[in-house]
Each structure stands twice: as structure tokens, then as C-alpha cells.
Amino acid sequence: MLSFFATLGIGMRSLQAQRQGIEVTGQNLANVNNPGYARQRLLVQSSVALPTEIGPQGTGADAVSIQQIRSSLVDRQITSESSVNAFLEAQQRALQYAESSLGEQIDRNAASVSGTSATNSGGSGLSTSLNEFFNAFQSLSASPSSITERQSVITKGQTLASRFSQTDERLQELGRGLNESLGEDLVNANNLLKSIADLNDQIVGSEFAGGVANDLRDLRQQRLEELAKIVNIESVQQANGAVNVSISGTQVVQDKNVADTLELYDAGNGQMLVRAATSDTPLTLTGGSVQGTIDARDGALASLRTQINDLAKQVISEVNAVHRAGFGLNNSTGEDFFSGTDASDIKVNARLTNDPTLIQASGAVDAPGDNTVALALAQLAMKRHASLGNHTFSERHGQTVAELGLALSTNNNRLTDQQLVQNMLTRQRDSVSGVSIDEEMTELVKFQKAFEASARLVSTIDEMLDTVVNLKR
């Protein structure tokens, strides 16, 4: 049978355990709005029983550890899916920037259904400028000697050239901006690698003497997920509590050390790619915002710029070929209408700009009223060009815009589906690790009542001791 003082010990240990339970519950409530926090529970177990003549008798309970309620499986899934989600978000942003650069209103539904034309003809982009340019030649064919109509052709030609140049310049600027964003992402990634290595060091040191560094582990998991949003990663838990991190087979964090870092390099022609600082070959990334940006830049955006330039080359070539064979009001001939080679440098011939009479609308010498060449130039709008996939200029541009719209629409649909997966996993983790105010309030009341009961036990034993002490009085 236990003594009074042993029973007092039971009450004392119970008071300590219930107090610690209240502290853990308070920590949970304090972090209810912390998305990276995993709720904690106090593990209480019976103290060592003492042998007595009537059998082993308990000596109360002890608080032995604070457990973190976390599912490593769900954490790994969320980390992996975060890379996919960030990959699609980066592509979406890049494609939206490209859409703005075109200056066209894209009907994404039409693009996804027909895949041929997705521009709003009422806009003021390149498609409108193409139509207005060839319409100006149509008007000139009705009055081939009119200086006003000739000036209109020059104005519409300058507008078209300006649209081509502006579009190409915007796409170039977009490419430079995407490269800058890659650099910023890699700076953040390298900072996260150092943070993870530092947290490994702190966790190993904290857990060396036993126990688990719950709050540090929460913070490290947040850093891993942030890193996964930039580049896809593989992480392996070590026996000492550290996490080793690899990117595409290259180890970048080993225990408390940063084994390698990431850097941006020029693979040629301004194509910025990612590699490990200790390697000369690019990393094969499969997820994260970095790869999403690279894929958009080298895929849909590169194709868009190529097609815009191909269209400009064809317009320059076809218009110049027809115009060169005609005659101006002063019988001039052999003049090109456009100078330049593609969208980057297309301009209306400066000689024509300075003297509209040099526009070669006639098909014969000394025939200012002849409209043969002007009409032929106007009819180029309806001509199908083999180099443009047997499309007219407007159709080819419409197809180019539609392809961008389709790429954006497809990406948006994939991102919507991916976000459903991400939200589902987040809800699963919240159901395991998230803090429920109702549950914590129940725990708080339970510990409070247990504390009061333990205090009552101590008070009762104190009264019994007092009675025994005063028996001889």
C-alpha cells in the first residue's frame, strides 16, 4: 500500500501533466491560423507501478512527450503536386503575357473548338492592320492617280509595319522578362536550400538528446514545399532527423550542408537554362515554376514569334514582288514598298513616304489611270500562300492567334483540374494535422477538469495528513 506522501506524488505528477496538456492545447490554439503548423498532442502514460502485497499498484501518470500529428505520405504528395501546380501557373502567366503582347482579343472557346480563328475582328491588332492595308490598295485601284489614296496606302502600310515591329518587340521583351524571372526564382531556390540545411542542423541538434523538434520540422516542411514550387525535388528523411534533398538526381542538401546550388546559364542564342553550379549540363526538370517558364518561353512563345516573323517575311516578299513590277505617276519602277526582312525591322520604303507619287500602282508606262498593280496588290489579301500552309495572310495570323488561345485554354483547364487535386490533398492534411478550435476547446476543458480533480486529490491527502498528525492531541 502506498504512503500518504506517495499519493501526494501521484497528485503532483498529475498536476504537472494536466498543466502541460493545457500548454500544448494553448500552442495549438495560438497557431490555428498558421497554415504550416501541424497540431500537437501530449502523450501521457502510467508511471512505473510498485509491487505491493495485493499486487502492483500504480503511481500515477507522467507526460512523456509532445507528439506532432502529421502524415508523411500526404506531405510528400502535397510537395509533389505543388511542383505541378506551380509549373502550370507559370505557363499560364507567360501565355497571358503573350496574349497581351499580341494586342488581340482572343475567343478561347472558338480557339478550342475550331483551332482556326480566334481573333475579334473589331480590335486594333495586327489582323485589323492587315485588312486595312490591303483595303487601302483596293481604294487606290478605284482612283490610281489620287495622291490622297496614295497617302492612305502609305499610312496603312506604316501602321501595319508598326504593328509587326511592336508585336515582335513585345515578344522579345517578354522573353527577357521571363529570363529575369528565372534568375529571381533561382535566387529564392538557393536561399531555400540554405534555410533547409540550417533547419536540418537545428533539428539534429535539438533531437540529439531525445524528443522531437516539432516546430522546426513544421518550418522545414514549409521550406520544402516552397522549394518544390520552384523546382521539382526529391527528399529523403535520415535517421538523425535531417532531410537530404535532390533535384533531378543532383544532391543539393546533405544533412546540414548545401551540397550544390542552382545557376542560370546561356545555352546559346539567349536560351537561358538551369544547371547545378558544379555541372556543365542542364538539369532535367519536370515541374516547378522554373520549368513552366522555360517550357512556355521555348514552346508556345517561341513558336508565336517565329510565326509572326514568317508572316512579316511573306508580306514583305509578296508585296514587294508585285509592287516592284509596277510604275509610279512619274514612270518610276523597281521600287520596293517595304524595307526590312521580318517583323523586327519592317518599314515602308522611305522614298515612298517622302513622295507618294512613287507608289507603283500602274501596270504600264505613261498610264497614271491604270490600276493593274494596285488591284493585284489588293488581291494579295485573298491569295493563298504555300509557305503559309496554303492560307491567306489573315487566315495565317488568325491561326497563329488561335494556337495561342488553344494553348492558354488547355493550360487553364489543366490548372483547374490540378487545383482540385491540390485542394483535396490540402483538405486531407487539414483533417489530420489541422487545428480544430472545437476539438482544442474540448481538450482544454478536459485538462482543466483533470487539473482541478488532481488539486482536489492533493488537498484531500493534505487534510488526511493533518488528521493523522493531530491524532495525539
Image: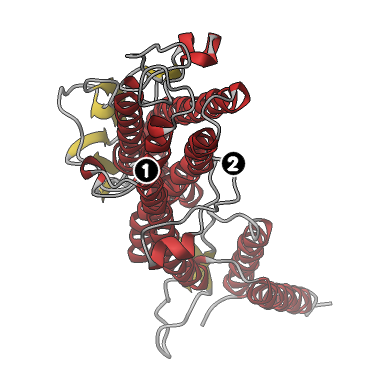
In the rendered view, tell whether residue 38 sits above or below residue 315: below
Q: How many marks?
A: 2
Q: Residue at x 40, y 20 (%)?
A: 338
Res 198 seen here: no
**Residue 279 position within the rendered picture, expressed as x and y whole percent measured from the top left:** 16, 24
**Quarter of the figure with residue 467:** bottom right
- Secondary element under disc 2, as helix, strand or loop, is loop
**Residue 38 position within the rendered picture, expressed as x and y whole percent measured from the top left:** 51, 60
**Distance Cα–Cα, label 1 vs label 2:** 16 Å
Indicate the quadrant containing the C terminus: top left, top right, bottom left or bottom right.
bottom right
Labelled disc at residue 448: none
In the rendered view, tell whether residue 359 sits above or below residue 405: above
In the rendered view, tell whether residue 276 sits above or below residue 52: above
Q: Amino acid at mark 2?
A: Ser
Q: Residue at x 48, y 60 (%)?
A: 108
Q: Which residue is mark 2?
A: 124
Q: Is 317 on the left-hand or right-hand side of 137?
A: left
**Residue 376 position within the rendered picture, expressed as x and y whole percent measured from the top left:** 37, 37
Q: Earlier in the sequence, mark 1 or mark 2?
A: 2
Q: Which residue is mark 1?
A: 393
In the rendered view, tell whether residue 340 sits above or below residue 230: above
